[in-house]
Image: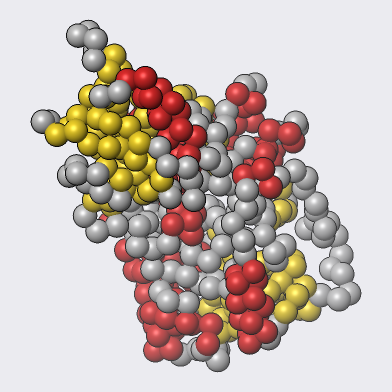
Amino acid sequence: MTEERSLQVKSGNTTINLTFSNEILSIAGARRTDIPSRNILDVALKPSPAGTTHVDIQALVPFKVNKLKLNNFNYEVVQSQSADSWVEFVKNVAYQKVKPNKHLKIFINPNSGTGKAVKIFEKEVKPIFDAAGCKCDIVVTNGRDDAKRKIIEASDLQNYDAIVVVSGDGIVHEVVNGLLSRKDESFIKIPIGVIPAGSGNALNVCLHGETINSSMQHSALTIIKGVPMDVDICSITQEDGEYFSFLSQTYGATADCDLRTENLRWIGDSRFTLGVLMAILEGRRYEWEMAIKYSEKNKDIIKQNYKKAYAEQKPKDVSDSEGIVKIERKYGSVNDPIPKDWEILSDDIFAFYSGKLPWVGKGAIPFPCALPNDGLMDVIIVNRDKISRLRAISMMQKIAKGTHIDLEEVDYYKVEAFRLTPKSRDVGYISIDGEK
Ligand SMILES: Nc1ncnc2c1ncn2[C@@H]1O[C@H](COP(=O)(O)OP(=O)(O)OP(=O)(O)O)[C@@H](O)[C@H]1O
């Protein structure tokens, strides 16, 4: 319970008490009551030329279903001597756990999703960052790897409180890879925030859930007031070097549904569904060899462990977060011999999907037991000869709710590492975080 403070202000012809108690800003007698305090962005005092003092409150208030709207409240203050301390008090409570007035490095991909990222940022997001007193340094990316290159080359990263991407997961992937490719690992502690302007926006769905996934205002608020959390990053070696992945690694129909439908970008996220349907109807078969180090193979145990870990999760204080402090590479590289305790799989598959986070997009939660920092990857393997076309369609529908893992044709594992070798380079893509 926070200390009671009130400020007498005029609203039209009535005098009202602005109070801030019990983490609720209530405006007694005014139009609006019970505005959650966490949505207050900024409070300021403004002396008018005539000598009266006004208090300006900018707040994100609930609007329609699952939306927020930026509102300005302006009141004339009756007792101006208590106004300063009231404003200070409200600011302190509204930004209890996070730094106010953040300095943000922002990357906008103008070609993300349906190509509206710049407009979305200018109209829906920038006014919120401005209201919260954030300083925005904006880069509009000019092509593949531009964001990655700029992160590697930046000499001023220490000046920023967060890196924000206005894009899909592709620019998040580039930022992660840029940070981890820097020589000075100290800067990789910077939190990454996301405004979902792409087609899949998996990271944003994982942060906000599916219902408010498309609310730019919620995403902006998370950047302003969210507490950073730790997420494992996977290290991947291919013949041409090392990559880092925060989201997923996939081969088979699950990779093709994204990478073989790039030309259908204009239809939005339905292209992924269409892509899997095409793979099922064509009866695609993917030949491979897989060496895998399991951590847990039993689905029931995986589910129980997940429930336990989830129940024990506690909100963390911002100061607890260490960010990415050190890269611990446990399993050598692609040219090393396969360790003895790994198992080898070689039956043809329909899909292999490995992930660090539950959702890979709206309506697709392939890894319902994923924990962002358990040091393990969740893996699905669908054997080509065990699943019929009909069951493959049923599996696809069940992925929307994460119940596909109960199908007997679907293997669901927790793994520490794997090595994937497609038999032919002509069949199918390998996709890392949705990138080729
Ligand atoms: N100016 C640009 N023109 C074309 N492509 C760009 C540009 N800037 C960045 N890119 C590339 O666009 C690719 C896709 O970007 P992004 O992930 O933002 O959108 P998306 O694919 O629609 O969303 P999602 O990854 O969530 O499906 C990235 O690989 C990125 O490197």
* 237 with respect to 86 (left or right): right
* Numbered circles on residues, count: 0
- Given residues 211 and 9, the one toward you in this image is 9
The residue shown at (43%, 89%) is 391
**Image height of 247 relative to 350, above or below:** above
* 70 with respect to 369 (left or right): left
The answer, for residue 343, to whether it is visible in the render is yes
The quadrant in which residue 392 appears is bottom left
Q: Give x and y (percent) for residue 196.
A: 39, 48
Q: Give x and y (percent) for residue 46.
A: 30, 18
Q: Give x and y (percent) for residue 288.
A: 65, 73
**Image height of 185 relative to 112, above or below:** above
**Image height of 301 relative to 329, above or below:** below
The residue shown at (64%, 69%) is 312
The quadrant in which residue 155 appears is top right
Tell me which colouring the rendered structure shows: secondary structure
Q: Give x and y (percent) for residue 35.
A: 31, 47
The answer, for residue 173, to whether it is visible in the render is no
**Image height of 69 relative to 404, above or below:** above
- Given residues 140 and 91, the one toward you in this image is 91
Check the image and name the residue furthest to the left. 13
The residue shown at (51%, 27%) is 103
